[in-house]
Amino acid sequence: MFASILLLCSITFAETKTLALQICLDRAGYSCNTIDGVWGGKTRRALEMYSADKGLNINLDDPDKAFDTLFPSSGEIFELATVCENDIASITSIPSSPAEKAKMERLGYESIKEMFAERGHLSERALERSNPGVDWSNVKAGLKLVLPSFPSIAEELSAWPRRSNGPKRPIASRIEISLSKFEISVFDEANKRIAFFPCSIAKNKSKRPSVGTLKVTTLIARPNYTYTPDYTPPGGKVRRHIYPEGPNCPIGVAWIGLNLPGYGIHGTPSPKTVGNAESHGCFRLSNWNAARLYAMCRTGTPVVILP
């Protein structure tokens, strides 16, 4: 599996089975959120769900053996990605002022490191460790980077509604969101789990949806975002600002709206924060998982909120 990667660069990090297990689980639809090569609770949970769904009794605290048992013939899981001129030209600096953000054409990536970490579903530290010696402050076109191989976010978003233009994602028959476990499971018509994602939920418990069944009402790729300040002085005028689309838009690259006004499942510009109680009420996913879920959903898809 790692033969070609060893020819590309002399690194040991890209050989670790924890990293390989995270990549293979993600490719199977069971995400640990951000791939980092570090064994932790999210990876253990993804492994637990995958092995249970496969009917296998796996030692959840032995990633090396789990990888050897579950993915003995995984093939090459890395690819060489080339930084191009358009990548460099698209890098932008995002201002802190809401008014200035609203003037931008796109809330794009702020660095090549951020861009390619997201392409590989990686933490920025894992990207660095997989590509030692790169001067990230001075990246030039033509640089080749070792990344886990995944469909791009653009490909995921193009899978709906024109399924021939993107990866062949199965159609979701039901989505379940656990408020206590901070996770989303997706099922097909045969009641088989087809995807598993860590998510963030509202920090304020009063803003969390009630247990019950909602449904998907809107699906928007590359959404913009209307920012409304939390506080307006008495007698003052509320000044709303419409932010443009982009991976650093506050709702990320995809919006899956629910039949509860103001609530939805969406991406985030901060994937490392996913899995916490820190949102304002919606359900946050990493951008790559939001795009993948978007590709599987249709309007009317039931969304079951669990305790």
Image (cartoon, helix red, strand yellow):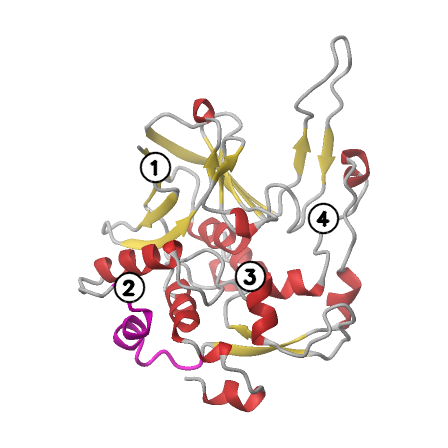
Using the numbered discs, state the Cα–Cα distance from disc 3 to disc 4 in whole angstroms.
Answer: 20 Å
Nearest to the eye among marks 3 and 2: give it: 2
Q: Residues within 10 Å of mark 4 (few under 14, many from 20)?
A: many
Sooner in the amino-acid sequence: mark 4 or mark 1: 4
Amino acid type shown at disc 1: Ser
Of the numbered discs in the image, which one, if any, rests on residue 61?
2
Amino acid type shown at disc 2: Asp
Nearest to the eye among marks 3 and 4: give it: 3
Amino acid type shown at disc 3: Ser
- Name the image quarter holding residue 71: bottom left
- Please tell me which residue lies in front, 129 or 79: 129
Q: Residue at x 47, y 64 (%)?
A: 167
Question: Which residue corresponds to mark 4?
Answer: 107
Question: Which residue corresponds to mark 3?
Answer: 123
Q: From the image, which quarter does the C terminus lie in?
A: top left
Amino acid type shown at disc 4: Leu
Count every numbered label the image shows and give the total.
4
Secondary structure at badge 1 equals loop
Question: Which residue corresponds to mark 1?
Answer: 180
Is residue 63 placed above or below 216 in the rendered structure?
A: below
Q: Which residues are magenta?
A: 60-76
Using the numbered discs, state the Cα–Cα distance from disc 1 to disc 2 in whole angstroms.
Answer: 23 Å
State if disc 3 and disc 1 touch (CB < 8 Å): no
Of the numbered discs in the image, which one, if any, rests on residue 227?
none
Is residue 32 placed above or below 86 in the rendered structure?
A: above
Sooner in the amino-acid sequence: mark 1 or mark 2: 2
Using the numbered discs, state the Cα–Cα distance from disc 3 to disc 2 in whole angstroms.
Answer: 22 Å
Sooner in the amino-acid sequence: mark 1 or mark 3: 3
